[in-house]
Amino acid sequence: MEPTQVGAQELVGTLLEDPAVEVGSRRSRLRRLLDAGRWRSQGRVATHPAARVGASVADVDFQRWMLLIRLVGLAGVAGLAPLYGHAEPIALGSALLLLGSLILVQVVWMRGARSPAAWQRFAVAAFAVDSAVGYLVGESLLGSPDWIGFFVYPILALEGAVFFGMSGAIASAVSSGFVFIGQVELRSALGYQTSPQVQVMVFVMLFMYALFVGSFARVGRRVRGDLATLIEVTGVLSRQESPTRIVQTLDARLRELLGARVRSVALRRPDGGYDILRWRSSEARTIEPGAVSGVSRFTGRDIEADFRDRRAVTFKITPGRDDGIIVGLGLPAWVRSITMVPIHSDGGLSGFLPVLWETPRVPNTDELELLHGLADQTGLAFAHAQLQRARELAATDNLTGLINHRSFQDLLRRQIRDAEAHDRHFAVLFCDLDDFQELNDQHGHAVGDLVLHRVAGTLKAGARGRDVVARYGGDEIALILPDLDRAQATEVAARLRAAVRLTEGGLGVDLTIGIAVYPDDAIDPAELMARVHAATYAGKRRGRGNIVQAIEVAAEP
């Protein structure tokens, strides 16, 4: 049955009427362990386990299957033991005791959230215990004429490959080979001979199996690593992190996967040069167009043409011979190869990703595929950042850094829609600098601009993070204060005015502030702004530094 969504009424009816749905139904502890990580359907409602913290899903899932395999192994060895008339009881009993103890420890271990390092330590210990159990089972059956106790040894190579890759598989095969040789000698002492053909076949089987499962595990680890890298980098990009943070993440992941380093990213300028953004240094570096042409002449390749055709370029670096490349690209002394992967965005070349290698090597096809994927993701991030920056510039007042009049009107309409939908209220403050024209006439427009910039910064600093502060026009600044009523807005206005008075620099700067509240004073954006305008100008008619409510203006004759 596939999980489906049900409405509230259907859900209530299902819980009351459908006996297939049992809230808190009994399950054995073992069943819950084996079911962890899968959705469980109860009638027409699917429930899902809580997210695990620490270990990866792959680690937990494989340990779950290993628990099942160990349970089957325990039952199999215990069930078949009576059939082995020649079994050595101490070795067989020790194997059963070890395996049973490991199962109990694993059941307890899997109940809690563990860190990746803790899971790795458990995998090492469990692998050692499994190996000991396998060898003890083989040891216990040495006295059997048709000894086949070594049949479990390839399974140990599989476990080693899954947890530790090719090296684990080979190490397991080598250990099993030495154990097998020793057990053959012991059988020979007991009067049982193992032919050389059988010994050779066992060794061939062990190592061929180890190579096979090791290669398969290596590919699987590589795929998981590439996927994890792309997911992590995508997450960094989606959070709109800084370019240096993106480079830092790329460096950490590529060093782990490929042994490569990424210390910077090169962004192409309109003149054909590149700006280098580095995460280990705040020093700004550039590659001038002449340096790019020089590297192309030195190598005999048109690097820009390769980049435009989405071809990565790798140079093996030899100090002394390739000083032109080292100087032109500003490479560290330890680099012996550099792979430059082009970055494209909006259909054009926007830069390249310099991947550095400590040995003279050329990345293979799989590695290049990963590097191109990361470069494409990086290009999308920079294109998004440029678009976001353009939007911010279009919505921002150049002098004050506040959002401009047009953006304020858009946000006011959005705030009204949100307040209407959720039955909320909000306040609008309209601030006007008193006698600003006289200040300009007396001290000049440069001083006036500085004062306006300072007042805008003070108001922005005094507002909450979700408040809107905008330059409405001239010396007028407007604020939207979500979820504040009339009394609260009056307190905020008084606090902001006091902050401006403290930072005005002895020039006598003061504010007159009008206050209107949605929906009490108006529900239409134009009418709301008209009411707050009227309150502000009524305050200016009364003198300097007044805070006036729109409701007061309506009551005036």
Image: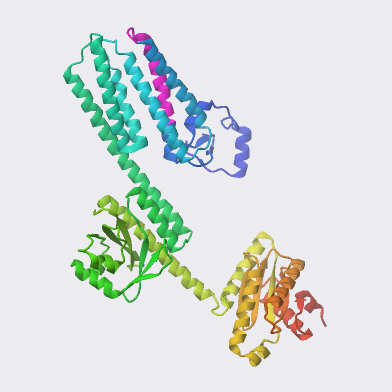
Q: Position of residue 284 (x, y in %)?
A: 40, 70
Magenta span: predominant SS is helix
* Residue 435 position (above or below residue 52): below
How many badges with numbers are in the image?
0
Residue 395, given in percent of the width and then of the height, sits at 53, 74
Q: How is the image coloured?
A: rainbow
Write the residue at 80% across / 76% down: 552
Q: Position of residue 155 (x, y in %)?
A: 32, 27
* 49 displayed left or right of 72: right
- Could you tell me which quadrant the C terminus lies in? bottom right
Residue closest to the eye, 441 or 370: 441
In the picture provided, is 170 more to the left or to the right than 520? left
Residue 412 seen in render? no
Q: Please, is residue 529 above or below residue 185 in the view? A: below
* Residue 237 lies in quadrant: bottom left
Q: Position of residue 85 (x, y in %)?
A: 33, 7
Report the magenta residues as a range: 64-87
Residue 142 occupies quadrant: top left
Q: Residue at x 51, y 72 (%)?
A: 392
Spot the residue most to the left: 197
Q: Which residue does the image show at 30% across and 33% down from the upper left?
A: 169
- Can residue 197 be seen here? yes
Viewer-proximal residue, 392 or 270? 270
| Front in this rendered view, residue 409 or 55 | 55
Considering every residue shown, the one lying at the far bottom of the view is: 441
In terms of depth relative to the viewer, which is nearer, 241 or 323?
323
Residue 68 highlighted magenta (yes or no)? yes
